[in-house]
Amino acid sequence: MSPLTGIWRSLDHLERPGDGSEEMQHREFPEGASELSDEWSRRQFLKIMCASIALAGTTGCTRQPLERIVPYVRQPEEVIPGRPLYFASALTLCGFARGVLVETHEGRPTKIEGNPGHPASLGASDAFMQAELLTLYDAERSQAVIHESQVSTWDLLLGELAGAAKKWQGNGGAGLRLLTRHETSPTILDQIARLLVKYPRAKWHEYDPLATELAAPRYHLDKAEVIVSLGADFLSAGPASLKHAHDFTLARQPKSTMNRLYVVEATPTLTGAMADHRLVMRPDDLEDFARTLESGTGSKVAALIAADLHEHAGRSLVIAGECESAVVRDAARRLNQTLQNVGATVDYPAAGRNSARNLQELVTDAHAGEIDTLVIIGGNPNYDAPADFEFGTLLPKIASTIHLGLYRNETGVACRWHIPEAHELESWSDAAAFEGSATIIQPVIEPLFAGRSRHELLAALLEEPFSSSYEIVRAFWQKRHAAPDFEQFWRKALHEGVIEDRSAAAPASSPPPNPPPPRSAGLHLLIRPSAQMLDGKFSNNAWLQEFPEPMTKMVWDNAALINPATASRLKLENGEVVDLKFRGRSVRAPIWILPGQAEDCVTINIGYGRTSSGSIGNGVGFNANTLRLSDAMWGGSGLEIGKTGKHHDLVTTQQHWEMEGRDQVRVGTFAEFQRRPDAIAKSAELPPRKDETLYPNVPDNGRAWGMAIDLNTCIGCGACTVACQAENNIPVVGKEQVGRGREMHWIRIDRYYEGDPANPAIFHQPVPCMHCENAPCELVCPVAATVHSSEGLNQMIYNRCVGTRYCSNNCPYKVRRFNFLEYDENHFEKPPTRKLMRNPNVTVRSRGVMEKCTYCIQRISAVKIEAEKANRLIRDGEILPACAQACPAGAIVFGDINDPVSHVSRLKASPLNYGLLAELNTRPRTSYLAKLRNPNPELEQI
Amino acid sequence: MNENLHGIMAEFREPEQLLNAVRAAYEVGYRKMDAYSPYVVEGVAEALGFKKTRLPLLVLLGGIAGAVTAYAMQWYSAVIDYPLNVGGRPLHSWPAFVPITFELTVLFAALAGAIGMLALNGLPKLHHPVFNAPQFKRASQTRFFLCIESDDHNFRLDEVRDFLQSRNPISVTEVEK
Amino acid sequence: MNAEVEEPLVASGYDSASVTQKITDIVLKCPLQRGWLGGFAFAFILLMLFNFAIAWVLSKGVGIWGVNIPVAWGFAIVNFVWWIGIGHAGTFISAILLLLHQDWRTSINRFAEAMTLFALACAGLFPLLHLGRPWVFYWLLPYPDTMDLWPQWRSALVWDVFAVGTYLTVSIIFWYIGLIPDLATMRDRAERKPVQLIYGVLSLGWRGSARHWKRFHMTYLLLAGLATPLVLSVHSVVSTDFATAIVPGWHSTIFPPYFVAGAIFSGFAMVLTLAIPIRKFYNLQDFITIRHLDNSAKVMLATALMVSYGYISEGFMSWYSDDKFEIYMTLNRMFGPYAPAYWLLIFCNVIVPQALWFKRIRTNPAALFIIALLVNVGMWTERYVIVITSLHRDFMPSAWGIFHGTRWDWMTLIGSFGLFATLFFLFLRVLPSISISEMRDLVHKKSESSK
């Protein structure tokens, strides 16, 4: 502006026209004024405080959305205080819907469960689904529209878009680019389609770091008797994993037959741990193996497996991992065809229609300067795009960049505009499940931080008169389901949480298939998603940061996983920091030696090393994406390791991984089971009989709660651990405290190795409180703070506990957890939003108090009260502890062991049933079913 | 005769002297008298006509009281007042009740002994006429005293003084009340 | 002990007058020496350190210590057991040796009893600090509370409360009763009025009447009779904290006797640790003679052998039991992560005391002093090994862990020395550190026998 027009504040200002009066608007202090600039700045502080005050208010009133949403069980004519309501909704994983039921107390979501009616969850959940709750309440989610790193408003953005729109109408939207994650939401796809119609020259790009195959084959594991996994972790990874685990379990029951699982992989996965035969090999060897499997010639092992497959033609299944090269995937497809499995155990959907272009194009165009407006909807390409795209240097080249996201992450920081996105539980939307059925995502709480939905942003781009997400979604479905009974359809859809409507089938765009890695000796790099952080989406989620990685049991870190032999050859040890050099790029990572890892293979997990994640995720671990290249998304050969002489402390929740010749986990083969069923679970030392005592036994007539955990079906995913944490208000304690052995999880998953470290047998064993009838812990408590209930629960009375910790010493299972410090006041539990999230039916424990698994006594009481009011008996299976409810494999069964026909009593009657350390005469109420393997006898002989 | 007289006190150097003096005094027929010494002198108490003490009985009673209290408390609270199923053990887990019973037995017995001793000795009694004798300071250090009290039925001032003088003491003094 | 070949219990040339004077003068006459002041100042600084450590643990929680799951018990319990053990020698000397007519106990029983009390004062603090919620420690006591709850009588910790409580009370009574005649002496020897008044009140007006002496002695013997089973019971009960638990390495029937022996062992070590400097500093060599040291050394040797037997039988039993957990525990103790601690305790408690077979060593104060110190260290380490190594690897390998004391753990341990020393220094200044009346008795008997 010229000095004569416009406002001028000083001569000095006149001297230097253009000195940002606009900049000044948002500057807090004049240039040079001392500004508080620690990472916890005053502004941030105020933001949090405002949020907290606002939220503190909400504890009183309920934040039901204005629109009518329909509860799963009964209509909320009014919220009855103390009575939870359940709403059917969905959460997306890699864009795919997984149906959930959200428990809300007085309008506050307090727990997420799988929706039994939804094909992708079947009532089960995994750690991610459980932990979404914490993300919802994360006070560090972005809370304001940011423009040029100054607080701005939604209307200002609309203004700017309106300006741009004029230009686009002229040039047909040239230079307008849309970058989304994989979108399955019918409404979103419709909006985008309309946008592309409106601006024909605009382009839509899709990028998902996990590159989930949208047209993924659909497996029917329950029908498969012989399964060969070529590097596929189908049981625990991907949007269909819950369904897979469920189906696999069905065929895993030791009846007349039991399925057989071969897994060929380079780095141990939960699926590999379940395998009857686990073959360890490098990815390039795996390709050869796939070929020999097809030809049936070559290695004897491959031949035998091929023979087994052919024996079970039509009842077998070959699954290729998504991280494997096209060679492997095509081989798998051909095998299934030759085995007539297609249509029986696997369906290959026709490659769907999807107009999205990939990131590559976007990058080239950007460098060519063809882009002036880039709208990034969700996602974090600046962090997770392949390193060779140099996304960071690319963004500044674009005149206008707009980012919509839950967090102001690496991308949000780099974009000119950042808009806080509403969480899936905060806004209306819809999404399709992996097999096509759609779900209406209904919000269960008003946006906590005034977030905007993707629909609203797209509507703004479409210049449609403002309408809420609710109107947009409903309008779409009205169009889709134009029928007089729409209202019923709508209510039913909301109520059931799933729409049987294949027309919503997920559009498909196969990711660029990995080129076959060039053969070369030397180390091979494997890049894999993290079981905790996924692709970094969850890195500010303390539950998942402290969720023990199923294989390493590591928390608060990622590491370069390496095989023991290779480690000793390279003289590397745990925690040693090395330079990983891969095709001209390098990253520093601590070493972790992992049995069962393929030789000369180094696995690193993405999702760590965030810089703009929030106070929890920032600086945790290293960023594996720095080695991720567009032509080697899942790694490749040619890795070099350089020593740095530095050390980094890695923390695990389990230090000792041998069973020391003890029989915590009892294993047998299916053949043995058929011969002598009772031999497998029998221990060397038999537990004393019930009458072998000087004392009279305590009469246990009436109800007697007990639990049976089936090691044969448990896949060790750890969903139970996080579910328990959510249900029971279990605090996060942080890396330092875990390092001192003070993690608080009430149910842990022990992982044991057996045999050759190069390829050991891997066992998982969930360990909650055993609720011993002769509880050693109770006997030693000086103040009767832990005693037995009439129904056989080993109860912990927090407000009576003085904290002698004697009970923990005397607990042979070490399942008791102690509040060594005031954990409820630590960095992770302090934020006021966390208080909103607490389960009101579970006491928050104070410092100095012992705690442990209660069999979810609050749920037991709730059901008992209902039953007494209805004057009826409690139905078997009516009471579901959080762990049992979450378990995708149905491995945890709870019920009344005095009721001979209850599911749990039937399991306990099984010859495979055994009590952990029962020889100590503790009489545990929690018992285990021995694990069975179904190895190929001929293969055994090799 | 001086109404305010507590008695006449002789001071000796050797414990044997005291012992003989007491024996003699007892033969002469004095009863109301007491001997004082820096440490116990065998036989003096008996010579003074001291019968055996009831302390052991007291201690025994104390012990019994302790035992009963302890066991009753545990049994009542664990079986009657607040029965709880603790580790599947019977409410009346008598073996577990033994240690506390024992401890309280000892405690009560010890208290009975200590308090009983003081009571029977009439202690604490911060003042006593014998302290009026200036040389009595040494009763707690080196000297041995015999004091024949004025309320003895055959107390004659001169006789007593002569008698005590005859035991060749270091000194003989009248002790005021 | 045949007195003719033995050294005398009191150097010749003492009568009751000089004995009295020599002992009372330490308190009444001799001025503040630099040595005492220095020692006291140092002790006091440690005491302040103790207060600091306690304040911090009370405000933050036991999380500032190294304790964790599985090792939920740490220094607090180790220190507790160690101090209790030390607290045993006093009553042992004054009660049991009295009943056994061991005259030589006379000149050391007073400060041995004082030592007992101060050790108990330290010991008593640790269980409280150990609690997660120390402010409700009184829930371990039986009282009709609003929750109508009682202590859980089956728990060894409740037994502890009663055992230690009783022991403390009885020790105080025993000590005080023994003090009364001496307090009277102090009263009569004090020049200044206020001093006379204080001692006068404390002595309850004792006047040494023959009848009083009679009852006094009767009580003293009865108390000794009661204290004898008590002193044996206390550490037995403490040992049940471990023995009644199912933890391998704790669950052992040998614990009670083995703990008692250990207690007397460490107790005598502490007696020597204190006696040797005191007799030098206040030149009491004439009262605390070489023979006292010699006898204490013999007791140490005997108890050392008992303790060694305990170690051996522990090892044997775990092998003989053929219990995989027991066997693993024993091997883990010897060769596991805490092996150094184990071998240190073997060295201090088994090897070193063997030197006491030789009279030359038993009669050499310097050597004895060093051995006593080593034994103190050894006994602390023993408790450390019992508590930590048993817990850190028990039944479930998946739950195995490791324990390291933090700086706060060490501060609390060292600080407790401060409390102990401060009390002891004060005791030396205000009370006769040797029983005057008994010494007079002794001197008299001696002159009798010499006649």
Image (cartoon, coloured by chain):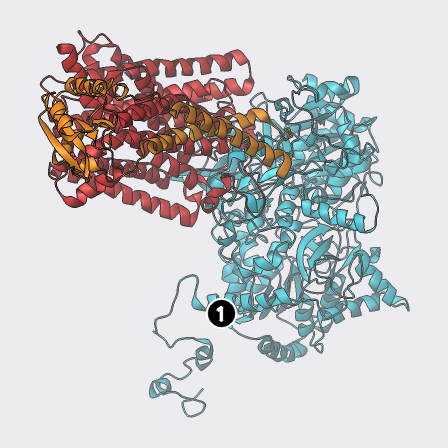
Q: Is residue C319 left or right of residue C221?
A: right
Q: Is residue A413 above or below residue A271?
A: below
Where residue C360 appears, as percent x and y from the top left, is: 18, 11
Provide the letter of the chain coloured red.
C
Crowd around label 1: few <14 · some 14–19 · many ≥20 (10 Å): some
Q: Colour of chain A?
A: cyan
Quadrant of the drawing holding the C terminus of chain A? top right
Q: Residue at x 70, y 49 (%)?
A: A213
Colour chosen for chain B: orange
Where residue C427 sits: x, y (%)? 23, 36
Residue type for callout 1: Ser
Query: Could you say which is closer to the camera, residue A432 or residue C174?
Result: C174
Instruction: Choose top left, top right, bottom left or bottom right for residue C304.
Output: top left
- At 60% from the left and 48% from the top, the residue drawn is A534
Residue A778 appears in which quarter of the rendering? top right
Q: Chain of mark 1?
A: A
Percent x, y for residue A319?
A: 73, 38
Q: Which residue is mark 1?
A: A149
A5 shown above or below A20 = below
Q: Position of residue C394 (x, y in %)?
A: 52, 27
Q: Which residue is located at x 34 percent, y 85 percent?
A: A12
